[in-house]
């Protein structure tokens, strides 16, 4: 955020998702004061598209999302790398190794660098995130290509002292200058664009060779071991070397794509063994292995370190110890593995007063025994935990409806699909249209708690308020459902428990798509508003 | 490993104010001119589930995470959650535990918990009824984190000066919470 401001960012769009949500939250607070436009978009694809439009209009642009958001936005993102930018653009993408706050998959968004030929910077900590955001804008400005800043949970939710530089005053209005040659990707032009992009990448590789983002920290090479490291793992490596007194040279990769092949070659020259330390899939390791081909240098990485889960000092120290054949003088790290006690897990649960308590109790009681419960992304994922245990599948945003339709079409079982307000706006609507159009019969329950709650209470299109706090059209879910052709639509306040039960009973019997909007504000947010008003 | 940087793990249940306490300790260390890094998690897991944060301060800090067996202090806002962090401890790790229990379906009994504490915690341990004290004297249970930090400072379980924490409260907390947090902190001096 600070880095973007110092770069003179003018346009910011985001969709919340842990661990990236705070970027949008903070821009929502400070955008107006700093003359920046900010929006929470309805989903990541439209956030990306808004950002592309801003960049095409000459604005310095930042788009922020979590990893799964980039999957949603990919359709717009890949051609954007082809067309390139006008206003410099940085896309922040937050991965979550160990899936602390991510249900769907343990995604390694660095893979998109290969798919899209997009330059990727990988900071290790908040201060570097600031510097690399500025560097990203610089590279984007120089080569007219969007740059991806890939962070992880331990970078995003790490605190440390950060320096702050000058924030330039930016202009607020851009201008779209027509240029069909640049902005229209129709073939055969699209193939020329690809060639141009590949040329740009080679130029950026030369830039990367000289960039301080990839730095060598020299050490004595007595054992002829070297470490190549990217992302937050750099901090773990430095910690181990400091604590153990080992002196090993390090090449820190700050720019993951395109890699500085020359710098890597000169770093590994003369070494016997190289340990590549990176979280998740060993992409850097593969590249280093290719560069070390036909030499006697041993390249290690995922043979000694796990592909799954985040790393830490313990795992890396063990790998280093095996590689060097020495016992490192860090006994605690190596010896206390497996001391965790077996204690029954404390599941997260719905907050006190949460309206979902009432909804879950009613639908669980009234649904037939063999009903299939469709889950979706939001606080209501807790439906899967005791005491509710009403979640038979859970994949990605909007899929409770989309998959529910497929099950309803394939079986004689009734499907109840749960979906939240923000998730409905995000990806539920096309699935709803498909369900009605193809004559399906799930009961869809929209849990409308008037806010995007799970990620820390961000506004969404159903609230009549924008990300900058301006009042806006309050888009009603029931109106959308009716417009999508759903014949049975009702809005219920779960506090009216009797009515709630009657409607559920009635709608469970329908043999067409039916939709109930359970509308009651998130209890936590309601308390927060009350507290703020008192202040 | 214990001589240079000081490593703290805070444990508790989502909603107990762990992140505020983490920020308060980090800010206090900054007041003293130390280098600091912390790590925390946000999101759904924090809704009443088990949570932990890490704080490391000292001359020069790299890793934002405390490794296995590396903690100097484990500060737990709930009694059972302390036991979940045992892998961060070795025989020299001090435990400061709020004598406060938030049971859940499937949680061990009080007797099982106290047996485990006896058996598993090898180093110094303090079980302080911080929630009870804060509730009785200040009417606010959520201050127990600040109270426990006071206990740690006055009993030298954490190398921070009381003045530094009080300055950090000034810097960090909104007006209306400053006074009561200072009271909670100082309350620990007399216990």
Image (cartoon, coloured by chain):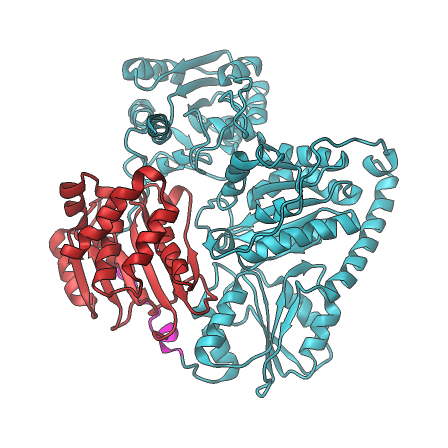
Left or right: A117 as drawn, with respect to A521: right
Please tell me which residue lies in front, B162 or A437: B162
Spot the red chain and give its letter. B
| Quarter location, residue A369 | top left
- Where in the figure is residue A55, as x and y percent of width and height? 73, 38
What span is colored magenta in the figure? Answer: A330-342
Q: On screen, B104 above or below A132?
A: above
Q: How many marks?
A: 0
- Where in the figure is residue A199, as x and y percent of width and height? 83, 55
Left or right: B145 as drawn, with respect to A308: left
Rendered shade, chain A: cyan
- Where in the figure is residue B17, as x and y percent of width and height? 31, 45
Residue drawn at (48%, 55%), measured in percent from left and top? A154
Queried whether the magenta region covers residue A254, the answer comes back as no
Q: On screen, A69 above or below B50?
A: above
Residue A382 visible? The answer is: yes
Q: Residue furthest bottom?
A: A222
Residue drawn at (33%, 40%), measured in percent from left and top? A385
């Amino acid at each position: 955020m600070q880095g973007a401001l110092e770069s003179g960012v003018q346009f910011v769009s985001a969709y919340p998702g842990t661990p990236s949500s705070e970027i949008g939250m903070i821009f929502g607070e400070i955008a107006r004061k700093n003359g920046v436009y900010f929006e929470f978009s309805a989903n990541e694809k439209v956030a990306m598209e808004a950002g592309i439009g801003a960049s095409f209009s000459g604005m310095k642009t930042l788009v922020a999302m979590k990893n799964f958001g980039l999957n949603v936005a990919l359709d717009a993102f890949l051609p954007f790398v082809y067309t390139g930018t006008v206003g410099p653009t940085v896309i922040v993408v937050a991965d979550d190794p160990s899936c602390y706050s991510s249900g769907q998959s343990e995604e390694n968004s660095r893979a998109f660098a290969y798919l899209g030929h997009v330059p990727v910077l990988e900071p290790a900590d908040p201060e570097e995130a600031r510097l690399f955001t500025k560097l990203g804008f610089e590279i984007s400005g120089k080569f007219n290509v969007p740059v991806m800043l890939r962070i992880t949970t331990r970078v995003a939710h790490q605190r440390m002292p950060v320096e702050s530089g000058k924030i330039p005053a930016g202009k607020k209005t851009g201008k779209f200058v027509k240029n069909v040659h640049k902005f229209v990707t129709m073939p055969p032009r699209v193939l020329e664009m690809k060639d141009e992009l590949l040329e740009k990448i080679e130029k950026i590789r030369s830039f990367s060779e000289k960039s301080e983002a990839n730095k060598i920290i020299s050490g004595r090479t007595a054992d002829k071991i070297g470490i190549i490291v990217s992302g937050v793992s750099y901090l773990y490596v430095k910690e181990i070397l400091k604590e153990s007194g080992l002196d090993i040279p390090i090449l820190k990769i700050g720019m993951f794509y395109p890699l500085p092949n020359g710098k890597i070659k000169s770093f590994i020259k003369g070494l016997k063994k190289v340990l590549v330390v990176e979280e998740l899939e060993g992409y850097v390791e593969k590249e280093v292995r290719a560069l070390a081909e036909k030499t006697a240098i041993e390249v290690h990485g995922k043979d000694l370190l796990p592909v799954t889960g985040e790393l830490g000092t313990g795992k890396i120290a063990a790998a280093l110890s095996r590689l060097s054949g020495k016992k490192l003088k860090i006994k605690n790290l190596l010896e206390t593995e497996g001391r965790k006690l077996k204690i029954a897990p404390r599941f997260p649960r719905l907050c006190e007063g949460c309206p979902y308590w009432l909804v879950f109790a009613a639908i669980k009681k009234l649904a037939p025994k063999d009903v299939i419960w469709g889950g979706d992304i939001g606080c209501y994922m807790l439906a899967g935990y005791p005491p509710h245990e009403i979640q038979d599948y859970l994949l990605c945003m909007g899929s409770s409806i989309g998959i529910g339709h497929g099950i309803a079409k394939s079986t004689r079982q009734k499907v109840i699909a749960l979906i939240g307000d923000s998730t409905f706006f995000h990806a539920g609507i096309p699935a709803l249209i498909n369900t009605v159009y193809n004559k399906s019969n799930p009961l869809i329950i929209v849990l409308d708690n008037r806010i995007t709650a799970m990620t820390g209470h961000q506004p969404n299109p159903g609230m009549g308020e924008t990300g900058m706090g301006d009042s806006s059209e309050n888009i009603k879910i029931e109106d959308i459902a009716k417009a999508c052709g759903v014949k049975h639509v009702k809005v219920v306040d779960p506090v009216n428990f009797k009515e709630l039960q009657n409607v559920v009973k009635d709608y469970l019997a329908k043999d067409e798509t039916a939709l109930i909007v359970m509308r009651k504000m998130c209890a936590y947010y309601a308390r927060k508003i009350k507290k703020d008003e008192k202040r | 490993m214990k001589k240079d940087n000081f490593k703290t793990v805070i444990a508790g249940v989502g909603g107990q104010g762990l992140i505020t306490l983490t920020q308060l300790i980090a800010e206090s260390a900054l007041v003293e001119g130390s280098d600091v890094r912390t790590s925390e998690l946000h999101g759904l897991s924090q809704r009443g589930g088990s949570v932990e944060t890490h704080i490391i301060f000292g001359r020069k800090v790299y890793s934002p995470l405390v490794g296995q067996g590396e903690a100097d202090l484990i500060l737990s806002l709930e009694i059972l959650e302390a036991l979940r962090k045992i892998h961060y401890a070795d025989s020299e790790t001090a435990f400061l535990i709020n004598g406060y229990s938030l049971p859940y379906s499937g949680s061990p009994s009080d007797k099982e918990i106290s047996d485990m504490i006896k058996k598993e915690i090898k180093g110094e341990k303090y079980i302080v009824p911080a929630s009870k004290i804060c509730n009785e004297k200040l009417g606010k249970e959520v201050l127990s984190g600040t109270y426990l930090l006071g206990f740690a400072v006055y009993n030298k379980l954490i190398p921070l000066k009381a003045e530094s924490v009080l300055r950090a409260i000034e810097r960090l907390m909104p007006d209306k919470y400053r006074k009561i947090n200072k009271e909670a902190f100082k309350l620990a001096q007399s216990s």
